[in-house]
Image: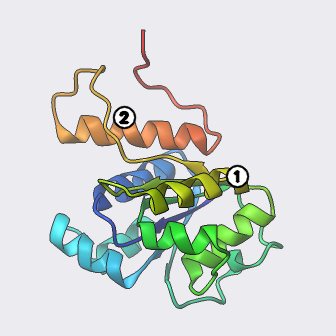
Amino acid sequence: MKFIVALTGASGQIVGIRLVERLREIGAEVYLVSTRAARITLKAETEYDEYRIRELATKYYDEDEIYAPFSSGSFKFDGMAIVPCSIKTASAIANGIADNLVTRAADVALKERRKLVLAVREAPMHAGHFKTLLKLCELGAIVFPLVMSFYTKPKTIEDMVDFTVSRIMEHLGLDVEYERWK
């Protein structure tokens, strides 16, 4: 199993980090990409830094490393998740602007008909945001807003993050056990 996980500058870095950890726990290869903005937000929101997240992944890339193997459709991977996904990144993908490794890899996922999950983190939204998200759905992406669920009666933030990560993993095509709606 091979997955690409990208961190962009939106709030919610811990969800992306936890996704990488969980994918590695099940033995998946994880190719992690982070943007400059993600690294700034990462420092503001977590105890992680660029060096620590590099250690989590099978292989780590900066957004400028456009020569990464998964920037080509000939590289086989099972899916990609952008967690968190900024509106800037979502807009670039929706409009075919592949100007960095995150948007290029997402473009490859779409053109090769591979799973692409965009965990969008923005609130409130205006009509332009909704048009962008609709366009992404029409292109085949799975738009997965980072909205926390409460029916599991979470006790900690970690409970909420793990539930959300489980749902993202399921949308990447993995069989995941977690508490479901009864």
Taking the spot 71% from the left edge, 61% from the top edge, the residue there is 77
- Which of label 2 and label 1 is nearer to you? 1
Q: In terms of depth relative to the viewer, which is nearer, 57 or 105?
A: 105
Taking the spot 25% from the left edge, 79% from the top edge, the residue there is 40
> Residue 85: in sight, yes or no?
yes
Residue that numbered label 1 is attached to: 138
- Specify whether 99 is left or right of 6: right
In the image, what residue type sits under mark 2? Phe
| SS state under label 2 | helix
In the image, what residue type sits under mark 1? Glu
Mark 2 and mark 1 lie on one chain; the one further toward the N terminus is 1
Badge 1: how crowded within 10 Å, few (<14), some, or many (20+)? Answer: few
Residue 76 horizontal/vertical position (percent): 77, 64
Task: In the rendered structure, find residue 163 and report the number of the disc placed on it.
Answer: 2
- Specify whether 57 is left or right of 173: left
Taking the spot 65% from the left edge, 40% from the top edge, the residue there is 173
Residue 27 horizontal/vertical position (percent): 56, 50
Q: In this view, does 150 lie above or below 168?
A: above
Q: In terms of depth relative to the viewer, which is nearer, 116 or 70?
A: 116
Badge 2: how crowded within 10 Å, few (<14), some, or many (20+)? Answer: many
Question: Residue 99: which quarter of the image?
Answer: bottom right
Task: In the rendered structure, find residue 152 and report the number of the disc placed on it.
Answer: none
Return the residue found at the far front: 127
Residue 9 horizontal/vertical position (percent): 34, 72
Q: Quadrant of the C terminus?
A: top left
- Specify whether 28 is left or right of 167: right
| SS state under label 1 | helix
